[in-house]
Image (cartoon, rainbow, N blue to C red):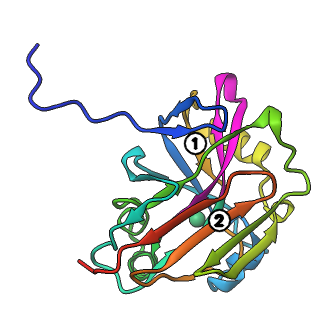
Amino acid sequence: MTKLHTAPKPVALSITDGRAFPVRRIYCVGRNYADHVAEMGGNPKTSAPLFFTKSRETVVAHGAVIPYPTLTENLHYEGELVVALGQDNEIFGYGCGLDMTRRDLQAAAKAGGKAWDMSKNFDHSAPIGTLTPASKIDLTDGEIETRLNGKTVQHAPLSHMIWSVENIIKSLSSFVTLAPGDIILTGTPAGVGPVQPGDKISVSITGLESLNVSYATSTP
Ligand code: MN
């Protein structure tokens, strides 16, 4: 059969052992750290974590210079632990990621009872670093730290997650069939904030490869 256009390019993450991890679906958890729920004006006691998705084409690799997105005057970083799934819902590996967010569009969507998609699932909105196989790392006492232009802006123990990684996978798998290649951004701690053209962002998690990206100096 003749194809109308070139098939979309596959998307893959790098792994510390040199292999590649082909990406299937990207799931994200919202409201998974109480102090972030509070900073967004929510009540951690009554708020439950939630799921949303990004397209795999939004993935950006470590070291990228990212074009500044259109239609926002309040682009935010959200540093997050990324979980990569293998066979049978098992965790293949972990990485550092960013859930980039057009906060102004998200606020408008929330206020209007509308979908979040255009605030979350936009071009280059999922920078994700090199994966470390789960067999090589113990995240029990792990901490996540986000730096903006070298200054620490987010810093929290991973144990502060409301839903643990195991609970996220259990809950998510009741909504959808998970498969090898699926990745989950597990939510962000407090300290989210705006990103300007030219800014550099880094996310570090104990024992994992750091993620460093920067934004282009020109705006659309
Ligand atoms: Mn997030």
Residue at coordinates 51% horizontally, 45% vertically from top-left?
26
Pick the front one: 191 or 105: 191
Q: Secondary structure at mark 2?
A: strand
Prevalent SS, magenta region: strand
Residue 50 percent location from the top left of the image: 61, 59
Q: Which residue is mark 1?
A: 183
Q: Which residue is mark 2?
A: 203
**Left or right: 83 with respect to 162?**
left
Q: State the mark number for residue 159.
A: none
Q: Is residue 44 among what the camera can see?
A: no
Q: Quadrant location of ligand 1?
A: bottom right
State which quarter of the image contains the C terminus.
bottom left
Magenta residues, as a range? Answer: 81-99
Q: Earlier in the sequence, mark 2 or mark 1?
A: 1
Q: Please identify the quarter of the rendering in which residue 181 is found.
A: top right
**Left or right: 52 with respect to 113?**
right
Give the residue type at disc 1: Ile
